Amino acid sequence: MLRTFFCFILLTILVQKGISESIKCYSCETNDEGCGREFDKNAAKVVTCPKTEHCQKIKHFSIGAFVEPISRGCSDGKECDSLNVCFECNEDLCNSAHYLKPLFIVIIACALHYLFE
């Protein structure tokens, strides 16, 4: 009974994350004032993403760059690959810093381990 209830709650959370309204994200590049390693949310532009996209912060791979290239904005996730470090989230203005996705994956993995133990 408890396991069924836990599965229902987990499924509800996953479905709610997939059925989302349009969200607002910060949109800027490293060269923009206040968008690099030190982020200034008051200086960044805010955009509304299409319903199929989420907010993202990408640390781009770059050899020998004086400043670590960072970009923020809306994304469908296709920019992420083995060379870039991506942080994705589904809440308004959540891409100002490191965010939820890595933690969310750990939570799901722990829940699945508990369920199928």
Image (cartoon, rainbow, N blue to C red):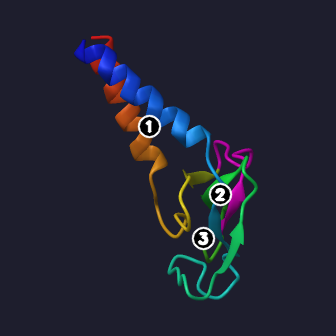
Residue 30 x, y percent position in the rendering:
66, 76
User: Marks 1/3: CA distance?
Assistant: 26 Å
Q: Residue at x 65, y 48 (%)?
A: 83
Tell me the magenta residue range: 68-83
Per the picture, the main secondary structure of the magenta-coloured stretch is loop
Q: Residue at x 59, y 85 (%)?
A: 34
Picture quadrant where residue 113 is located: top left
Residue closest to the eye, 40 or 84: 40
Task: Give amino acid for label 1.
Answer: Ile
User: Marks 1/2: CA distance?
Assistant: 23 Å
Numbered label attached to residue 17: none
Image: 116 above or below 112: above
Q: Which residue is mark 3?
A: 68
Placement of the N terminus among the 4 image quadrants:
top left
Picture quadrant where residue 72 is located: bottom right
Residue 92 x, y percent position in the rendering:
56, 64
Q: Which residue is mark 1?
A: 105
Q: Residue at x 71, y 54 (%)?
A: 75
Task: Give amino acid for label 2.
Answer: Phe
Q: Which residue is mark 2?
A: 61
Secondary structure, mark 3, is loop
Residue closest to the eye, 89 or 17: 17
Task: Give amino acid for label 3.
Answer: Glu
Residue closest to the eye, 69 or 106: 106
**Crowd class of label 2 (few under 14; some 14 to 19; many from 20; radius 10 Å):** some
